[in-house]
Amino acid sequence: MIKRIAVLTTGGDAPGMNAAIRSVVRYGINKKLEVMGVSRGWWGLINEELRLMDHRSVSGIINQGGTILKTERCTEFGTKEGQERAYQTIKKNAIDALVVIGGNGSFSAAHIFNKRYQVPCIGISASIDNDINGIDVTIGSDTAINTALSAIDNIRDTATSMERIFVVEVMGRDSGYIALTVALAGGCEDVIIPEIKFDLGVICHEIVEGNIRGKASWIIVVAEGAARAEEISRRITEITSLETRSVVLGHIQRGGRPTAFSREMALILGQAAVDCLLRGESDKAVGMHEGKIVTVDFEVAIIKKELKVEKLYNLIKILT
Ligand code: F6P
């Protein structure tokens, strides 16, 4: 029987992680569980940095970005020794199960750990990249998109006023999700994503053609996994002789107050994760798919998500 669970956040932080922690802690307590909070993800298990949480430990965090538990990309957990130490912490503190809030790197680690030590683990899908297979929207991705969109709206003011070409780089290590969504919603002229081969010659031709027609300002969104904004900007100037500027939005997209949607999802999934553990489920992630809460085996969740990009990509081109 599960009496005590531990919750941790690992990998890159995502807005809404705090709301998920709040939900796991308060719902867990409501279900008569003891809930421990682990500091800095797997690192905290390896180094026995954890504390018992109560209602008050999660007060006033629902609207905060980041994670009060802190997070790390912990390479030590990839070693047998690191995992053994983490397991010793779990045994010593009588922890029966884990809730792991993070992305696919976090779930890969949880899957290995679960298989090796049979510690029940449930993941909550949180990543701005929205790249978890089998899950439509991750906690934090909506906030990141809105943050990037607001920056692009601001950039458009200068692009229009000074009739300039801007190349804006957004996050998304292997995925064009953020780039594609903000390019469409921001009315951007072009988008470069890892999923679709791009031809800079064609983009430059379109810019020059547009210029002849009197269209002098362009915003091209680039996913970091596809190209670097600075390089693209430099090459556009070389080819077209037009003035360009590059902007890298970077970690601005990872922080900030979670949107209502990111919070709502985090709170619902926190509850779902605790319920999964109480039902005896393990080795899977909870998330939303087609408007419903679903569980996806870690083994499936970590497979590269196939993003269906053509429809949105073509729409961006048509609407330019
Ligand atoms: O996975 C989320 C993410 O923000 C990616 O989009 C990005 O490539 C990466 O994390 C950056 O990681 P770090 O903060 O460790 O540099």
Image (cartoon, grey):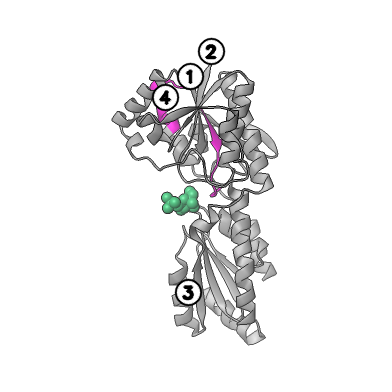
* Residue 131 coordinates in the image, percent (x, y): 53, 46
Whether residue 275 can be seen here: no
Q: What's the mark number on residue 115? A: 4
Q: Is mark 2 on a helix, strand or loop?
A: loop
**Is residue 163 covered in magenta?**
no
Residue that numbered label 2 is attached to? 1
Image: 38 above or below 154: above
Give the mark nearest the N terminus, 3 or 4: 4
Q: Looking at this rendering, what residue extends furthest in the left direction? A: 81
Examine the rendered structure and indicate whether residue 249 appears above or below residue 128.
below
State the image quarter where residue 119 is shown.
Answer: top left
Q: From the viewer's perspective, is residue 3 above or below residue 20? A: above
- According to the picture, the residue beneath numbered tag 1 turns out to be 96
Lower sequence index among marks 4 and 1:
1
Residue extent of the magenta highlight: 110-130
Is residue 202 something that shows in the picture?
yes
User: Decide: marks 3, 4 in contact (CB < 8 A)?
Assistant: no
Q: Do the residues labelled 1 and 3 touch (CB within 8 Å)?
A: no
Please name whichever residue, 199 or 141, is drawn nearer the observer in this view of the structure: 141
- Residue 235 is left or right of residue 289, and the answer is left
Q: Where is residue 158 in the image (x, y as percent from the top left)?
A: 61, 76
Q: Residues within 10 Å of mark 3 (few under 14, many from 20)?
A: many
Q: Do the residues labelled 2 and 4 touch (CB within 8 Å)?
A: no
Query: Label 2 vs label 3: CA separation?
Result: 59 Å
* Residue denoted by label 3: 233
- Residue at image position (50%, 62%) is 197
The quarter of the rendered structure image containing the C terminus is: bottom right
Q: What residue type is labelled 3?
A: Ser
Q: Residues within 10 Å of mark 4 (few under 14, many from 20)?
A: few
